[in-house]
Image (cartoon, rainbow, N blue to C red):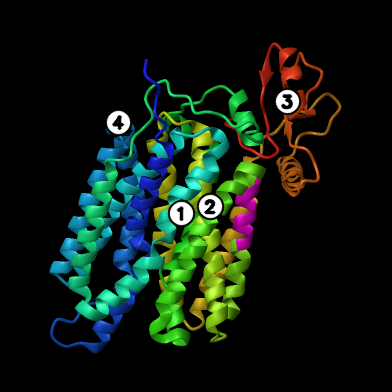
């Protein structure tokens, strides 16, 4: 039998490039500003929209994107990533083509909100799964972070490009040019996406790290969507994703408008710089989660995002362009971490066989969060001091989301005479040990609970001792990893 050619990095590059094209979603604030200027200017050919509904195409797009991920995930699992991404590219082209033909509200809701939103869902769902399958579990966070970073980084070039096109050719012609470019790029790159052949086993590094060590020890899990819907962890993750994404999208969709008062026509710079933070957060969170675990990383990112939202209440009223750009960068960084951590959670907890559909179900939280938080923000912003209220609400929800991550901690059975297990104590023990390992103060350890016949229940062992312990243990049940994750 001929040797299997590893196409992993080629697939990663193609998936990242596809996301670089589809990330036009995050440049909506540039389109929104141009539409608003057209409405206020009036005249022949101007957009005749109600200013209160100007964000509707973006909100509908987020919702469609999320729910299209369910159908797209099923397609990805059944017909493969190449055809799924091809469908996505065609849908995006149709959506932008419709926007180029008309400036009506209905055309833009249908074109950007429905067609392009569905195209984003199909393309995005096809980019990450095949890339993850080519690599070992020790690189799950890193690979997911790199691929989805393309989506977050897209506004770095799309924001200035869109601003220039709109200024040179007008809104509708700009949509036509962008649509042609994105369609050609996504459809061409789709043919590079491929799953590894059946029986392919990715090579493991000499020291894969604690997350991969645990995943190698536990039995293979390939949960169906009906099974994950019966797991409480799905709902904890869904709510946390809803909060993290909704708060971030609320700011991303409005950052150009917030920057315009202090940066004028250069407001697109804030969008582009925030995109760098968005992409950076995806890669950094992926690498960090491979080292200290998904739960601890999610707790850190949601907590920092909450602090950024509370700080935003003062920054947006300061009139300082520098502070606004820094704030947008850090909010983008923390928001971006969500788009790396949650697909990694889905792979760790539920396996790769039905990954597309399973993550599609979880990803609905992203769209619902963006839609609901966007609408609530609009209603609050219509009131005196509404902007501060929006940030206060987002910060409070993010703090609650960070607290919810405690319920993802695994409980070890209490031995006779011991205090009943506490998820908070277990979470804190994991978090602190992960921090010490990351800082280099302590050797990597795996916390495990052995079956009743073993006397080592709840002990901590180093990687060097793992083989000896498991050679002597006829039955072992893995319960917790200090710096990793495990399914129920």
- Dot 4, crowdedness within 10 Å: few (<14), some or many (≥20)? few
Left or right position of 257 against 471: left
Q: Are marks 2 and 1 in contact (CB under 8 Å)?
A: yes
Residue 438, image x and y in percent? 72, 47
Mark 4 vs mark 2, CA separation in Å: 29 Å
Label 4 or label 2, whichever lies nearer to me, is 2
- Dot 2, crowdedness within 10 Å: few (<14), some or many (≥20)? many
Mark 3 vs mark 1, CA separation in Å: 36 Å
Above/below status of 306 relative to 352 = below
Residue 253, image x and y in percent? 40, 68
The residue under label 2 is: 283
Toward which corner of the image does residue 58 lie, by quadrant? bottom left
Mark 3 vs mark 4, CA separation in Å: 37 Å
Residue 381, image x and y in percent? 45, 77
Q: Which residues are magenta?
A: 296-304
The residue nearer to you, when weighing 488 against 126, is 126
Label 3 or label 1, whichever lies nearer to me, is 1
Of the two numbered discs 4 and 2 on the same chain, state the one appearing first in sequence: 4
Of the two numbered discs 3 and 1 on the same chain, state the one appearing first in sequence: 1
The residue under label 1 is: 149
SS of the residue under disc 4:
helix
Of the two numbered discs 2 and 3 on the same chain, state the one appearing first in sequence: 2
Left or right position of 83 against 43: right
Residue at 27 percent of width and 87 percent of height: 40
Q: Are marks 4 and 2 in contact (CB under 8 Å)?
A: no
Residue 302 located within the stretch drawn in magenta: yes
Q: Are marks 2 and 3 in contact (CB under 8 Å)?
A: no
The quadrant of the image that shows the N terminus is top left
């Amino acid at each position: 039998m001929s040797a299997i050619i590893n196409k992993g990095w080629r697939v990663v590059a193609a998936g990242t490039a596809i996301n670089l094209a589809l990330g036009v979603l995050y440049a909506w604030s540039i389109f929104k500003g141009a539409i608003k200027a057209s409405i206020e200017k009036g005249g022949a050919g101007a957009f005749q929209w109600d200013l209160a509904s100007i964000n509707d195409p973006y909100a509908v797009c987020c919702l469609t994107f999320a729910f299209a991920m369910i159908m797209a995930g099923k397609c990805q699992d059944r017909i493969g990533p190449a055809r799924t991404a091809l469908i996505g590219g065609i849908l995006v082209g149709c959506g932008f083509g419709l926007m180029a033909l008309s400036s009506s509200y209905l055309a833009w809701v249908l074109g950007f909100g429905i067609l392009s939103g569905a195209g984003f869902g199909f393309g995005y769902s096809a980019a990450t799964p095949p890339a993850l399958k080519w690599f070992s579990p020790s690189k799950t966070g890193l690979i997911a972070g790199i691929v989805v970073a393309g989506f977050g980084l897209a506004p770095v070039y799309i924001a200035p490009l869109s601003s220039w096109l709109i200024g040179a050719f007008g809104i509708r012609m700009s949509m036509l040019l962008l649509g042609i470019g994105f369609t050609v790029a996504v459809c061409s790159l789709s043919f590079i996406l491929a799953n590894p052949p059946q029986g392919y086993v990715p090579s493991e590094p000499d020291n894969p790290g604690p997350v991969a060590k645990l995943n190698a020890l536990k039995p293979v899990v390939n949960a169906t969507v009906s099974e994950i819907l019966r797991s409480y962890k799905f709902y904890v993750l869904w709510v946390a994703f809803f909060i993290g994404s909704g708060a971030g999208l609320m700011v991303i969709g409005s950052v150009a408008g917030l920057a315009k008062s202090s940066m004028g026509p250069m407001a697109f710079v804030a969008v582009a710089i925030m995109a760098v933070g968005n992409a950076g957060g995806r890669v950094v969170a992926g690498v960090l989660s491979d080292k200290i675990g998904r739960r601890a990383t999610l707790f850190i990112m949601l907590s920092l995002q909450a602090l950024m939202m509370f700080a935003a209440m003062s920054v947006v009223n300061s009139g300082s362009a520098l502070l606004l750009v820094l704030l947008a960068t850090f909010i983008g960084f923390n928001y971006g971490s969500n788009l790396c951590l949650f697909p990694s959670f889905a792979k760790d907890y539920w396996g790769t066989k039905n990954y597309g559909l399973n993550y599609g179900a979880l990803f609905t939280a992203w769209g619902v969060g963006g839609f609901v938080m966007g609408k609530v923000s609009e209603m609050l912003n219509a009131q005196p001091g509404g902007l501060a209220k929006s940030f206060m609400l987002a910060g409070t929800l993010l703090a609650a989301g960070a607290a919810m991550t405690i319920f993802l901690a695994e409980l070890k059975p209490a031995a006779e005479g011991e205090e009943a297990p506490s998820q908070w104590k277990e979470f804190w023990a994991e978090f602190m040990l992960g921090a010490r390992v990351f800082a280099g103060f302590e050797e990597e350890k795996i916390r495990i609970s052995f079956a009743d016949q073993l006397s080592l229940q709840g002990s901590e062992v180093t990687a060097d001792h793992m083989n000896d312990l498991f050679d002597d243990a006829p039955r072992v049940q893995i319960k917790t990893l200090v710096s990793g994750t495990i399914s129920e």
